Amino acid sequence: MNQDIYVSLGQIIKKYRKKKNLTHSELAELVGLSRPSIIRLESGKKKIYFHELGKLLGAVDLTFSQLESELSNVDLKVKIENQPISKQDQITLLKILDDLI
């Protein structure tokens, strides 16, 4: 998966963490990760695994449906071998993510 998706996911998690007034440490404790992992995750430097994603979404009161909506509002600059992917392919990628969730 392209790094841009991790950055987008991290930004969304950060947004909802702040809405709940949670610190990095509090979120880390809720989901069983370290504080540095949460910081790296929010900056897109740590991959989000499916089992972590469910815990994170629950901790910040974000549903998979809301996540999908948030992602659809993000202009993902997905590239394969440094070639831009069309908007239609980006939509397809979001549908694939939705099927996984």
Image (cartoon, rainbow, N blue to C red):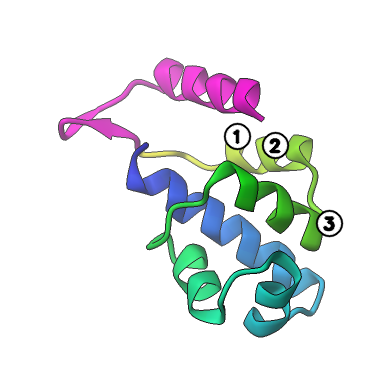
The stretch of residues the image draws in magenta is 78-101
Does residue 53 appear in this view? yes
**Position in image of residue 75 (x %, y %):** 47, 39
Number of residue marks: 3
Sort mark 1 into few (<14), some (14-19) or many (20+) by Cα contacts within 10 Å: some
Does residue 60 appear in this view? no
**Position in image of residue 6 (x %, y %):** 45, 50
Q: Nearer the viewer, residue 40 or 68?
A: 40
Q: Quadrant of residue 90?
A: top left
Q: Is residue 76 left or right of residue 83?
A: right
Answer with mark 1 or mark 3, whichever residue precedes in sequence: 3
Tell me the SS state at disc 3: loop
Quarter of the image where the N terminus is located = top left
Circle 3 residue: 61
Q: Does residue 100 lie above or below 75 as drawn? A: above
**Position in image of residue 68 (x %, y %):** 67, 35
Tag 1–tag 2 contact (CB < 8 Å): yes
Distance between the Cα atoms at labels 1 and 2?
A: 5 Å
The amino acid type of the residue labelled 1 equals Ser
Q: Is residue 72 left or right of residue 6?
A: right
At 51% from the left and 21% from the top, the residue drawn is 91
Distance between the Cα atoms at labels 2 and 3?
A: 14 Å
Q: Does residue 97 lie above or below 60 as drawn? A: above
Residue 72: numbered disc = 1
At 82% from the left and 72% from the top, the residue drawn is 20
